[in-house]
Image: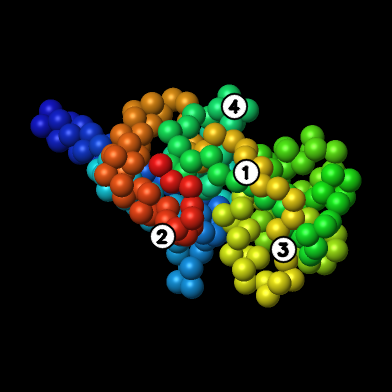
Amino acid sequence: MKKLMIATAALALTAGLAMAQTVRMGTEGAYPPYNFINDKGEVDGFERELGDELCKRAELTCEWVTTEWDGIIPNLVSGNYDTIIAGMSITAERDEVIDFTQDYIPPAASAYVALSADVDLKGGVVSAQTATIQAGYIAESGATLIEYPTPDETIAAVRNGEADAVFADKDYLAPIVAESGGSLVFAGEDIQLGGGVGMGLRESDTELKGKFDAAISAMKADGTLNTMIKKWFGEEAVIY
C-alpha cells in the first residue's frame, strides 16, 4: 500500500510538472497581421510565429486559444488562458489589473482612415474597437466616438457611412488601405499612443513572466525579433 501511495504521488507530481510546462496563449484571431485565423482554421500571423518561438526558447509547450477582444483581460484573470498575446498596448490602466512582459513591438503609430482625406476628425464621428487605447483617445478628443467589438466592424462603419473615420493601429490599417483601390485613404496625422505591445499575464505569474522576458530579450539581442517584425509589417516598420 505504501509503495502504491508513493507511486501515485510520483505520478501526480509528474503530471503536475507536465501541465506546468503547457501555457495557453490567448489571442483574438481577428487583427491581421498581428493575429488572424488562416484558411486551415488555425491561429496565424506575427504573434503566432513570435509566440511559438518564445515558447521554444523558454522550453514551454504552447496551446493557442482565441477569445473576443472585449473579454480578453477578464478571461485571463479568470484563468481561461495564461497569456494575452494579441496586439495589446502596454498602458498604466491595464497594468493595474494585469502584468506585462517587456514590449515585443516598439511604440508604433495609430492613424485615421476615411473615405476622404479632408474629413472632419475633430468634430465628426470616429469608429474604434471597444476597450482599445484608440477608443480612449477618441473619447477625449472632442470627436464623437462609436465603438465596435471587432476591428472589421470599425472599417465597415466608415464604408457604410456610420462613421466619418476609423482610428486604429496604422500597421493594421495600412494593408486595408492598400487593398481598397483608393476608396479608403489616410487622413490627418499619425499619433503615438501606448508603451509598445507586450504579453499580458496574471500578476501572480512572475516566473512565467521572467521566462518570456528572457526569451524576448534574447530575440532582441540576436536580431531575430527585428527580422520577424519586418517580415510581417514591412521593411519600413519601427524596429529595435
Residue type marked 4: Ala
Q: CA distance from mark 2 to mark 1?
A: 29 Å
Q: Nearer the viewer, residue 87 or 13?
A: 87
Residue pointed to by mark 1: 71
Q: Nearer the viewer, residue 166 or 191?
A: 191
Report the disc number at residue 185. 3
- Kindly indicate the quadrant of the structure image that contains residue 195: top right
Q: Is residue 7 left or right of residue 240?
A: left
State the residue at coordinates (42%, 56%): 230
Are the two marked residues, 2 and 1, in contact with CB atoms closer than 8 angstroms? no
Going from N to C along the chain, the mark reached first, 2 or 4, is 4
159 lies above or below 64: below
Which label sits in the foreground, 2 or 1?
Answer: 2
Q: CA distance from mark 1 to mark 3?
A: 31 Å
Going from N to C along the chain, the mark reached first, 1 or 3, is 1
Going from N to C along the chain, the mark reached first, 2 or 1, is 1
Going from N to C along the chain, the mark reached first, 4 or 3, is 4
Residue pointed to by mark 4: 92
Is the N terminus in the top left, top right, bottom left or bottom right quadrant?
top left
Q: Nearer the viewer, residue 209 or 34?
A: 34
Which label sits in the foreground, 4 or 3?
Answer: 3
Residue type marked 1: Gly
Which label sits in the foreground, 2 or 3?
Answer: 3
